[in-house]
Amino acid sequence: MGIMELVKEIAEFEAQGVNVITITGASVKFGVHDVTLLRWARRGIIRVVRPSPGPPHPTLLDEKSVEEAVRAYRKNPGQGKHTMDIRTPVPVGS
């Protein structure tokens, strides 16, 4: 997948009302380590819009769910694996 295909795919998600962000982009934007974001995605705390089929294709996340998870994380700071209760995932709009 080239950059143009990725841009087209992102535009299609956004046309459906889903703002997507890559793990790297979310890490930079929200100041949370990318490994933490991967862990949250695997546990269902944040919504994965499209998983990566493998390098170099990025995993696309629902930006709203990342923002909500980061907000919850910041209310109870510490090591991510201890501050996020995986039994009650962060609600997502869709």
Image: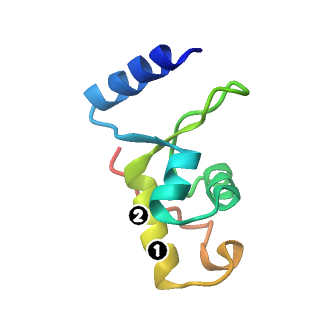
Mark 2 highlights which residue?
A: 68
Residues tagged 2 and 1 counted as in contact (Cβ below 8 A): yes
Q: Label 2 to label 1, Cα distance in Å?
A: 6 Å
Q: Write down the quadrant of residue 7 in the picture.
A: top left
Q: Nearer the viewer, residue 78 or 89?
A: 78
Q: Which of 29 and 9 is in front in this view?
A: 29
61 displayed left or right of 59:
left
- Disc 1 marks a residue whose amino acid type is Ala
13 displayed left or right of 80:
left
Q: Write down the quadrant of residue 54 in the picture.
A: top right
Mark 1 highlights which residue?
A: 72
Residue occupying image coordinates x 33% and y 37%? 18
Is residue 76 depicted above or below 66 in this figure? below
Q: Position of residue 67 (x, y in %)?
A: 41, 60
SS category of the residue bearing label 1: helix
Q: Where is residue 73 in the image (x, y as percent from the top left)?
A: 52, 75
12 displayed left or right of 32:
left
Residue occupying image coordinates x 41% and y 63%? 68
Q: Which of 7 and 20 is in front in this view?
A: 7
- Assign the N terminus to one quadrant of the image: top right
Is residue 9 depicted above or below 46 in this figure? above
Residue occupying image coordinates x 55% and y 56%? 27
- Assign the C terminus to one quadrant of the image: top left
